């Protein structure tokens, strides 16, 4: 049991450590998820800013393109005019402006391409973040399921550990009770054996005393009839009998003193019987008790300590052979109706009821209930006593 309990405790500690590690992993994943959400928000803001810049640049590009077209038209007109006249300062200025506008247009196109590439990259990162968020959600759900499973296993292990501890305590109490009953049974058996030996010795002493008296009478008769001296062997036998008589007398006195010392053990059986009656009174309401049900309960209650109970009651207390017979007799309930007992039991024990013997055997139990011989058999106290008195012992 201790090894099993230790294994259960180790499993609980291991599951607790696993749950703590899962908590740490979940916390890290939640922090990563929060960082990714913040990064996604920043990238979204950056994308909106770039889209605004792209729109501004596109408008500027259109304006520059329109201006360039106008400059080209002006340049064409001026070029036609320059064929006729020499290149003037205005033409050079227009050419310089044209080149500047072309460079600016190329720069705008490059910036537009860069913004388009950056927007595509941001869109790709955004899709990646969406996939990562969905993955984190799946991980969160799986982690929550695993956490619930670990909690259920931990609770089950705790219940198993507490149940095992309760079973161990109950087994320990049961073992202690068995040890106490075994010791009481040993003491009782030794007391009974001592009493039997004392009775045998007393019987043997009486036989020897009678034989000694007979031998003395025979010796006197023979001596008077024959007027002869007794034989040496007869004198020795007669002289040896008083010594054996005194020896057996001393053994009997010691046995009686030992029995007097162990006489309080008899009351242990009475205590066991009273304990059983108290259990029956607490378990069954007296007004609704059924005889056969109480008999089954008695058999179940004495299934483990029946040997000790029987041995103690055989020493002289409540050992009437009619205990089991009286318990099966019909009795009246509070309504005056006879209880339902099977026909073969009624026919078997009909006529065995003896009021005097029944009341004498009930003296100890009646003192418990406070009733005496003069109470009417139909009184409530006697009816309650009849319900619980002298249940048969378990076989």
Image: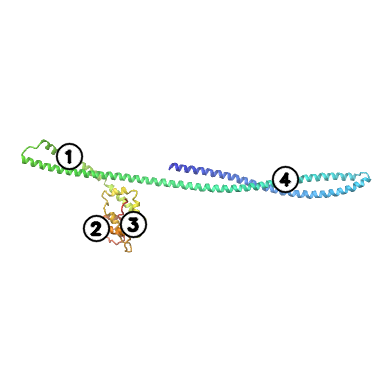
Query: Disc 1 on helix, strand or loop?
Result: helix
Query: Disc 2 on helix, strand or loop?
Result: helix
Evaluate whether residue 37 shows in this view: no
Q: Position of residue 381 (x, y in %)?
A: 31, 59
Identified at 72% across, 45% down, the residue is: 118
Its colouring scheme is rainbow
What distance separates the C-alpha of mark 4 from that of mark 1? 129 Å
What distance separates the C-alpha of mark 3 from that of mark 4? 95 Å
Residue labelled with disc 2? 356
Q: Nearer the viewer, residue 303 or 363?
A: 303
What distance separates the C-alpha of mark 2 from that of mark 1? 46 Å
Closest to the camera, between mark 1 and mark 3, is 3
Residue labelled with disc 3? 292
What distance separates the C-alpha of mark 4 from that of mark 2? 116 Å
Of the residues under marks 4 and 2, which one precedes in the sequence? 4
Identified at 73% across, 49% down, the residue is: 51
Residue 200 disc label: none
Badge 3 vs badge 4, beta-carbon distance below 8 Å: no
Of the residues under marks 2 and 3, which one precedes in the sequence? 3
Closest to the camera, between mark 3 and mark 4, is 3
Residue labelled with disc 4? 118
Residue labelled with disc 1? 244
Q: Nearer the viewer, residue 145 or 198?
A: 145
Identified at 82% across, 49% down, the residue is: 65
């Amino acid at each position: 049991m201790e090894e099993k309990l230790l294994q259960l405790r180790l499993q609980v500690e291991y599951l607790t450590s696993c749950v703590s590690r899962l908590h740490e992993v979940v916390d890290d994943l939640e922090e990563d998820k929060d960082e990714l959400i913040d990064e996604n928000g920043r990238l979204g803001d950056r994308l909106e800013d770039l889209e605004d810049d792209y729109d501004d640049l596109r408008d500027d590009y259109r304006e520059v393109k329109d201006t360039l077209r106008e400059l080209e038209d002006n340049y064409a007109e001026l070029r036609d005019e320059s064929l006729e006249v020499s290149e003037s300062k205005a033409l050079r200025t227009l050419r310089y402006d044209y080149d500047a506008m072309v460079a600016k247009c190329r720069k705008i196109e490059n910036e537009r391409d860069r913004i388009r590439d950056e927007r595509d990259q941001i869109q790709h990162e955004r899709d990646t973040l969406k996939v990562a968020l969905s993955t984190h959600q799946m991980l969160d759900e799986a982690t929550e399921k695993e956490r619930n499973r670990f909690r259920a296993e931990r609770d089950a292990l705790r219940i198993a550990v507490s149940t095992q501890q309760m079973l161990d305590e109950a087994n320990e109490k049961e073992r202690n009770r068995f040890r106490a009953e075994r010791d009481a049974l040993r003491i009782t058996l030794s007391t009974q054996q001592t009493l039997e030996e004392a009775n045998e010795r007393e019987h043997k002493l009486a036989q020897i005393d009678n034989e000694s008296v007979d031998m003395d009478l025979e010796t006197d008769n023979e001596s008077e009839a024959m007027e002869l001296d007794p034989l040496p062997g007869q004198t020795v036998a007669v002289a040896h009998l008083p010594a054996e008589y005194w020896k057996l007398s001393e053994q009997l006195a010691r046995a009686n003193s030992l029995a007097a010392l162990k006489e309080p053990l008899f009351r242990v059986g009475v205590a066991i019987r009273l304990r059983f009656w108290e259990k029956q009174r607490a378990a069954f309401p007296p007004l609704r008790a059924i005889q056969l049900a109480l008999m089954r309960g008695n058999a179940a209650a004495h299934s483990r300590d029946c040997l000790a109970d029987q041995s103690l009651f055989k020493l002289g207390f409540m050992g009437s052979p009619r205990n089991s017979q009286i318990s099966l007799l019909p009795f009246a309930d509070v309504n005056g109706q006879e209880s339902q007992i099977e026909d073969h039991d009624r026919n078997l024990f009909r006529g065995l009821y003896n009021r005097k013997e029944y009341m004498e055997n009930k003296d100890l139990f009646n003192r418990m209930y406070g009733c005496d011989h003069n109470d009417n058999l139909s009184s409530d106290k006697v009816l309650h006593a009849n319900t619980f008195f002298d249940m048969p012992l378990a076989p």
